[in-house]
Amino acid sequence: MKKIIIILLLTMYTISGAYSQSIFGNWKTLDDETGKVESIIKIYKEDGKAYAKIIEIRNETSKNNVCDKCKRKNKDKPILGMVILDGLTQDDDKWSDGEILDPKNGKYYKCYIELVSVEKLKIRGYIGFSLLGRTAYWYRAED
């Protein structure tokens, strides 16, 4: 009986550890200059691909902003609720072959993301090759 309980506990621990090491969930973005939380981004899976949308904006004066610099479908749409990470597919530990939108400048970039640790996510946006780009880190937030 003790063996069964130990096996069940180990299985539950393994499953919960795998979930906590997922890219999916809520993530905090930080201001590069102040280090304060700017927004909360929710990464979710749909049809086997990863997407992310802005679910919270911390700056009260920015909550109702629209993406006036955006092109395509996001032109003049509210930034709050906007999908900014679009259609990434999993390749081992990385998610790639999609794009990310920077609502501050309205530009789309190719990107990949990977989990650095349970609490830290690396986002690399680039034009052309990944060498020509910018890396940002998001930090896990409570769901």
Image (spheres, grey):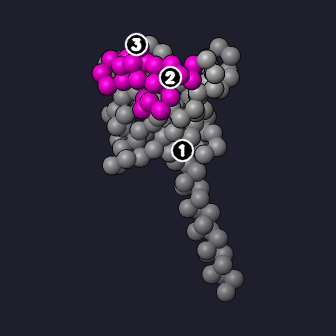
Residue at 57% from the left image edge and 23% from the top image edge: 63
Does residue 116 sit above or below 131 in this rendering? below
Q: Nearer the viewer, residue 95 or 108?
A: 108
**Residue interval drawn in magenta:** 62-84
Amino acid type assigned to the residue bearing label 3 in the image: Lys
Q: Does the magenta stretch include residue 93?
A: no
Give the mark, 1 or 3, whose residue is nearer the N terminus: 1
Residue 3 image point, x, y percent: 65, 81
Residue at 50% from the left image edge and 23% from the top image edge: 135
Quarter of the picture holding the C terminus: top right
Residue carrying label 1: 25
Residue 35 image point, x, y percent: 67, 21
The crowding category of the residue bearing disc 3, from other C-alpha atoms within 10 Å (few below 14, some 14 to 19, many at least 20), is some
Residue carrying label 2: 135
The crowding category of the residue bearing disc 1, from other C-alpha atoms within 10 Å (few below 14, some 14 to 19, many at least 20), is some
Residue carrying label 3: 69
- Judged left or right of residue 47, residue 3 is right
Amino acid type assigned to the residue bearing label 2 in the image: Thr
